[in-house]
Image (cartoon, rainbow, N blue to C red):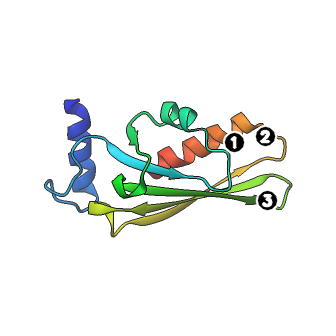
Amino acid sequence: MRSLALLALLLGAASGLSAQEAPAGPLRIFLDCPETNCDSDFFTRAIPFATHVRDRSDADVHILVTEQDAGGGGDAFTAVFIGRGSFAARRDTLRYFAPQDATDDMEREGIARMVGLGL
């Protein structure tokens, strides 16, 4: 637990936050997937270094994941990371492109990898 607190402190310092502004404990995230199949149990296991919350107002980061068809027949997933609270000034966007023959499990793993990198 001490190592998580130290990691949060170091990440806060690296991102320009003071030690007082860094969140106490693990990062709280709200994963919002209105257009995709968000298996909350899968993402909780796949992103264990964050606390998953059910209300976006309780989160440090609101992650909005959308999906659309890609040109080659696959799917394009976009994750918008919206900072809240001490992270309110931060916002970023990442994309993951799944090939046409990707299974649902492969897509979930790709989304989890994208979200993990974004956090």
Earlier residue among tags 2 and 1: 2
**Where residue 107 is drawn, which disc sits there?**
1
Crowding around mark 1 (Cα neighbors within 10 Å: few <14, some 14 to 19, many 20+) is: some
**Where residue 102 is drawn, which disc sits there?**
2
Residue name at image x 38 percent, y 40 percent: 51
Q: What residue type is labelled 1?
A: Glu
Left or right side of 118 for 77:
right
Earlier residue among tags 3 and 1: 3
Residue 16 percent across, percent down from the top left: 24, 62
* Dot 2: element: loop
Residue name at image x 41 percent, y 49 percent: 29
Residue 81 percent across, percent down from the top left: 47, 60
* Dot 1: element: helix
* Dot 3: element: strand
Residue name at image x 33 percent, y 46 percent: 27
Asked whether disc 2 touches disc 1, contact meaning CB atoms under 8 Å apart, the reply is yes
**Where residue 61 is drawn, which disc sits there?**
none
Distance of label 3 from label 2 (alpha carbons): 13 Å
Residue 86 percent across, percent down from the top left: 26, 61
List the residue tagged with mark 3: 69
Q: Which amino acid does label 3 sit on?
A: Asp
Q: Is residue 45 above or below residue 60?
A: above
